[in-house]
Amino acid sequence: MTYPKELKEYPQLEEKTYPFRLFFNQCRDAKAEQNILFLHWHEHFEIIVMQKGGAIFHVDSRPYEAGPGDVILVPSGGLHVGYSLINGDIAFVSIVFHASLFKDRYQDSQHELFVAPYLNNLYRFPVKPVEQNPVCSTYYPLLESLIQEVRDKSPAFQLVVKNQLHLFFTLLSRTFPPQRMSDRHHRERYSVNRERFKPLLEYLEQHLDEKITIESAARFVNLNPYHFCKTFKKLTGRTFIDYVNLYRVNEAERLLLETDLTITEIAGKVGCDNPNYFTKLYKQYKGLTPSVARKM
């Protein structure tokens, strides 16, 4: 599967010998529907462990709700994005690692049979395993233990993390034996849509200062407006207008924090010629005005 290169992330992992890293994500006083994980993809696996609050994660166009204790598996190359479901604090841990973490096990026939097919993307685990088999919840303490190992950083914690991850994958493969995915045609259909939308996503990122309507965006990908809106929401979890507004506000937030540009100049750079409208839009998505955000 191929995704827009602009959405690709290159996670900085701990070290080449142990290519994994934990990201402790916190969003204080999040608003319902607030973006808590930006749309992106990477060649690494990602295991999202929900610790506080409630969120919905879209992984390869499908939504998955998560509350405290839930686990979301993002396959290598999976396009994913997340939004808050509550008004309040959100906390989740992202366990990110590369398949090469287990390269020393390639001579193990059992590894090659049960774990390697998932690492090589020949097969995939369910994104939310517990929905398909509740027994998976008994494997989740391995992830909590892994997280604590990283927090404590005791001697050889990297080796413990590596072994716990491998055991976690092994138990999952026992529960979901390697087999061809039944929704192959579904995935192929969405892969075509992603390729179709690639030029549009590239254009949006490079032309935030320009106006673009639903009609013109639909023409960009050779769809009528109705099917364009329907497909776009399946891909991103947002309507087209909402996605563009959120993208602009996030870029505006970056400019507010990292540059000395005036608020009027920033508004122009993200396609808002009217500073008053920009202030209203920013407050709608961030809960405070641009001037207050800059002072904070």
Image (cartoon, rainbow, N blue to C red):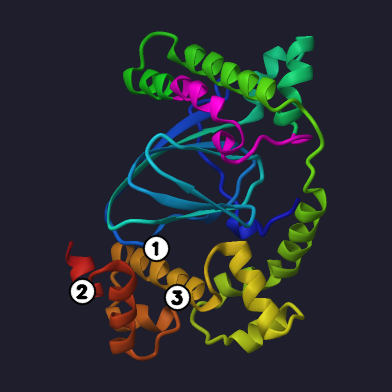
- Foreground mark, 2 or 3, reads 3
Q: Nearer the viewer, residue 279 or 239?
A: 239
Horizontally, residue 116 falls left or right of residue 58, namely right
Position of residue 9 relative to residue 106, above or below, is below
CA gap, disc 1 and disc 2: 23 Å
The three-letter code of the residue at mark 2 reads: Ser
Q: Main secondary structure of the magenta part?
A: helix
Q: Residue at x 82, y 37 (%)?
A: 180
The relative height of residue 79 versus residue 12 in the rendered view (above or below) is below
Q: Which mark is residue 291?
A: 2
Where is mark 3, residue-wise? 245
The secondary structure type at the circle numbered 3 is helix
Percent of width and height locating residue 274: 35, 91
Q: Horizontally, is 145 left or right of 175 in the view? A: left
User: Which image quadrant for residue 24?
Assistant: top left
Disc 2, SS: helix
- Sequence-first tag of 2 and 3: 3
Disc 2 from disc 3: Cα separation: 18 Å
Q: Residue at x 34, y 62 (%)?
A: 32
Cβ atoms under marks 3 and 1 closer than 8 Å: no
